[in-house]
Amino acid sequence: MVERTLVLIKPDGIKRGLIGEILHRYERAGLKIVGMKMVWSDRDHAMKHYPTTDEHMRMMGEKSLKTYAEYGLDPIKYVGTKDPLEIGKMIRQWNADFISSGPVLAIVLEGNHAIDNVRMLTGNTIPTFAAPGTIRGDFSLDSPALANSRKRAVKNLIHASGDVSEAEREINHWFKKEEIHSYTRAEEGVMFE
């Protein structure tokens, strides 16, 4: 099942010089780069990248509350509320601030089960829970508790689309149709036929 997915190497990955390492891991796994560009997004563009539904923002807030509970921290002390929706709204703002704070490398990857494979290679969204051997597990240690206490986004190096509809929406947000290319990699016949 050939899919396309969006990956953003965020400003922390760019500033740490991890572009080559990150791209190498995706390509080595058999994923094909079919679109790529460096972009310094304005805040409006960054805000439109993140979903605006209450459901999505509540989910982000619940993840943060779970991390607070695991570390025995009081969310009211750090963000002034225990309401997952309100925390999610704050996180959306912080995420947009972060990805518009410097250049990002926007990448469209294509391959069999590209969405799941990219997310597996990338590792858990929360770097402290990412397995060793994943990109986040090897290069990031940030957590929602630390990020929220500093009122900033979690510095997790990469954004990777979560499902087919999200990938389609995000690819269309970051790329024009003519910026995405089709070609055959040399090893495709060996790997997939």
Image (spheres, rainbow, N blue to C red):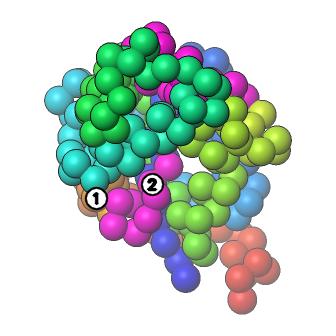
Say if residue 103 shows up in the picture: no
Q: Position of residue 28 (x, y in %)?
A: 76, 55
Q: Which mark is residue 169?
A: 1
- Residue, far right: 132
Q: Position of residue 72 (x, y in %)?
A: 61, 24
Does residue 152 show up magenta in the picture? yes
Does residue 67 show up magenta in the picture? no
Q: Which residue is mark 2?
A: 161
Q: Residues within 10 Å of mark 1 (few under 14, many from 20)?
A: some
For marks 1 and 2, the one nearer the N-term is: 2
What's under tag 2, amino acid-wise? Ser
> What element does badge 2 sit on?
loop
> What element does badge 1 sit on?
helix
Q: Position of residue 161 (x, y in %)?
A: 45, 54
Q: Position of residue 97 (x, y in %)?
A: 32, 21
The answer to which of 29 and 123 lies nearer the viewer is: 123
